[in-house]
Image (spheres, grey):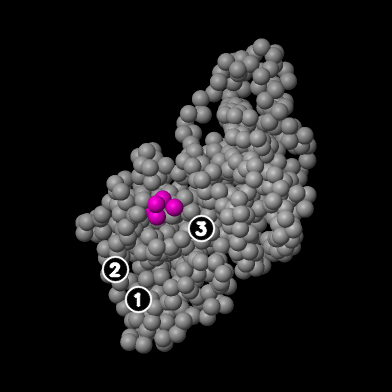
Amino acid sequence: MKLDQLSPDRVALRRPETVMRLARMGSFHQSRLSFMRVLLRRLKSENWRFERRAFEIDAKGVGHAVYTMHGPERSYSLVAFAHDLAPELRSDRVIATAWDTTFTLFDGLPTAADIERLSLNVPLQEAGRVTSSELTVSRANRSVRMFDHVVDCLSRGEQPDTALVDAVGYLMRTTAVYGSGKLGAADRESICDRPEFAAPFQAEMLTVFLIRGFVLDLVEHLAVVKGGGRAITLEPKLRRRFGIGNSTGLGMAPFLLNHPILLNNWIAARETGLARVRGVAAATSDEIEAFRTLLRRGRRTIDEWQSEHPIQSGRIAELKTDLARLNGHVEGGALVEAYPWDRLYQWAETALSIEGQELLVSLMMEPYGALIDDLPMQMSADENAGFRIEGGMTVARLRSILEEDYAWALGIDWQSPEAQARTWYISAEKLEPRLGDRFSEPVAAYEQPLAPGRDAALLYEALKSEADATRVADFLLRHPEHRHILRRVQIAARHPYAEIRDNTVAADVLPIDLLRAKLSFFGACHFDPRSDRWVRINMFRNAPFPHELAEMEFAGWTYPALSEVSA
């Protein structure tokens, strides 16, 4: 798929050398294309029905619950297990062995025998085993201060402190949501032909959506246990202010490098959506008003975004300035000219920071569901189809691809220690990706192939002694060590957004940029880096709960409603 084939309108898609830089990818925001929002649009449009089939939780908060969504053809059930976890065992680290709650998404309606089997395995997570009847496996821990505060307040007949709710934003944090065959669960291939799972990560998003409902029910149940007749439930608007937190670290970072075709499809969909909007010849008054409304709501969202990380806190401050400048520009009549969105984006390229530009990309797509909402169905990928190496390609053609698509890598001095300061490897303790220091830690021997820029430069150097007419297959017979990067180069030639155009082992690489790029496509917001290697986020904050799907308006639920805007 060539770049010019992707462009749907008069406005060309942004070039990969612009989009596929870590600083920009680390500034992406959620949008209409984000997988949480794709899920909820489908659940509403198809009138999915929610049922709480079981809630057998005792006075200590221990037991199980079953939450089911019934769709047009199938039903899916979250089986939740609540545990009495000692404080000293509570940890967000992936190496934890016990959690406050554990979950699985079951394909259909679980029987008593299923629940008994799952109760012996799901609480163990990696130490247990599930079957192809389970689509995901997950776990979560309490945000103890927030959880206890809400239980205590509700038990006394009072609502929790709104400022604290807004500052924390969740009662529990997930530390993993595993799918795609992990721990014996169903492989992606077994469910990808189902319409509800055609877009990426829909089973995982459904899991988190149902977990959120269970957590809020659990906290209200424990308030009743503690307060008896005095206890109350959360006021509905305040209840929706709670999302599900998530702590994500280096384990997720290599995903975008390891799935180049999938990454291309995600970015291509986003860039196609942007180009479609920029190609709109004139904005209607309703479209302009929708954008202005969401801009106001977006400004409030940024006002509520808190982070102690120095880089992110600086970006938030800059973003507030950006949005004030954007608002002034829009109120000055910027949207009444021909091709207003194209003009607005071109203005932003010089007037706003990268973070501000990427938030504008998301905001511009909001009024245009009719132009955008078909694109998520194009975001999945059959990566096996791109695995085969084109052995008949000539060395001359391969060189030209490298010179065009990897010029950024060929210009790096790979002999510099700063250029190869980091090493990606897999920890023996938990079989999770880690990032070590190449020159001060004994990890180079265990390096994973996650430095495509360096490897492309090595391939290019090896090709210098080859005749132009030499076939790739013959070259690889003599140099099989280049097989992995040669395959990747050929993939990048067919998929323009497949490669991140930055050095992923440089001394100054920020893995949180990789994390944020992926999480923005999930639909996460309020990114809060805790270091350069892990981040906390919030998922489904302000979203309706499963029992509210039918009556709630979805436009812009990821932005807090203002008094003049209906929820």
Residue at image mark 1: 221
Q: Nearer the viewer, residue 505 or 332?
A: 332
Callout 1–callout 2 Cβ contact below 8 Å: yes
Above or below, 265 against 359 in this view is above
How far apart marks 1 and 3 lie (CA) works out to 31 Å
Packing grade of label 1 (10 A; few <14, some 14-19, many >=20) is many
Residue at (47, 58) in percent of width and height: 554
Could you tell whether 260 is left or right of 339 in the image? left
Residue at (77, 34) in percent of width and height: 411
Image quadrant for the N terminus? top right
Residue 139 seen by the camera: no
Residue at (54, 78) in percent of width and height: 162
Q: Amino acid at mark 2?
A: Phe
Where residue 227 appears, x then y in whole percent?
A: 36, 86
Residue at (38, 82) in percent of width and height: 232
| Disc on res. 55 | 2
Above or below, 199 against 103 in this view is above
Q: Which residues make up the magenta segment?
A: 41-45
- Queried whether the magenta region covers residue 44, the answer comes back as yes
Residue at image mark 3: 555
Could you tell whether 187 is left or right of 147 in the image? left
